[in-house]
Amino acid sequence: MKNILFNLIAMLALATSVQAQSGGILWVGSRNATGEVRAVHVALKKAYDAFIAGDMKTGFAIYTEDASEIGTDGNITHGKKAMEEGWEAFSKMTDKPAVFKYENVQVRLLTADVALAIWDSEADIVLNGQQIGGKSKDAAVLRKIKGEWKIEFDQLTPMLGMPALDADSKH
């Protein structure tokens, strides 16, 4: 009887695990990605590699025409055209071209055509001699449209030091 009960519990746990994976509960990094999750990783890599190379046109191609973004300054920009125009105007004010890094991309499929992505990024942006870039935690909602993964919404959250926590970690 114990063996039957144990096997029943084990099968239930396995079935729940398989259902959780297909339902999008797990976050998947690029090394373990397959299928649609891998396609999302590839789309994000193409866009961010373009941004890093200074190819803003290719970078912005990942956004839908009606995409929205909350930038590190807290402002909301609606529409890819407005994002491109805003970046172009901002770039003219900086002392040098921005330099970007990104890593630790994780993707979670919510449905067959909707995904969440999170990642760490860092921007080296200098304005009037002052570093205004920095590290951020970023997230995006992507939707598969005509076979391509596109960003509908993203947000960039600056990583600010917490003095009390920083002091505690030194003890």
Image (cartoon, rainbow, N blue to C red):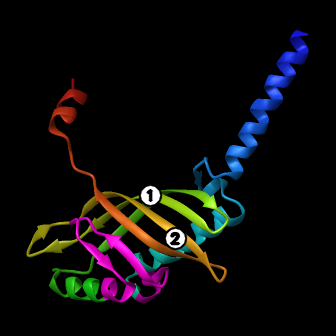
Residue 153 in which image quadrant: bottom left
The mark total stands at 2
- What is the span of residues highlighted in magenta in the rendered image? 57-84
Label 1 element class: strand
In percent of the image, x 50 and y 60: which residue is there?
A: 117
Residue 119 image label: 1
Q: Residues within 10 Å of mark 1 (few under 14, many from 20)?
A: some
Q: Residue furthest left?
A: 128
State the separation of the CA atoms marked 2 and 1: 10 Å
Please name whichever residue, 4 or 139, is drawn nearer the observer in this view of the structure.
4
Residue 104 image label: none
Q: Name the residue tied to disc 2.
A: 44
Q: Percent position (x, y) of residue 104?
A: 48, 54
Please name whichever residue, 23 or 107, is drawn nearer the observer in this view of the structure.
23
Q: Percent position (x, y) of residue 35?
A: 72, 64
Tell me which numbered mark, 2 or 1, is placed earlier along the sequence: 2
Residue 69 in which image quadrant: bottom left
In percent of the image, x 9 and y 72: which residue is there?
A: 129
| Left or right position of 146 against 100 | right
| Left or right position of 144 against 9 | left
Instruction: Note whether 101 is above or below 25 in the view shown.
Output: below
| Left or right position of 130 against 42 | left
Q: Percent position (x, y) of residue 70?
A: 30, 68
Q: Residues within 10 Å of mark 2 (few under 14, many from 20)?
A: many
Instruction: Note whether 161 is above or below 44 in the view shown.
Output: above
Identity, as a three-letter code, of the amino acid under mark 1 = Trp
Identity, as a three-letter code, of the amino acid under mark 2 = Leu
Is disc 2 in contact with disc 1, using a CB cutoff of under 8 Å? yes
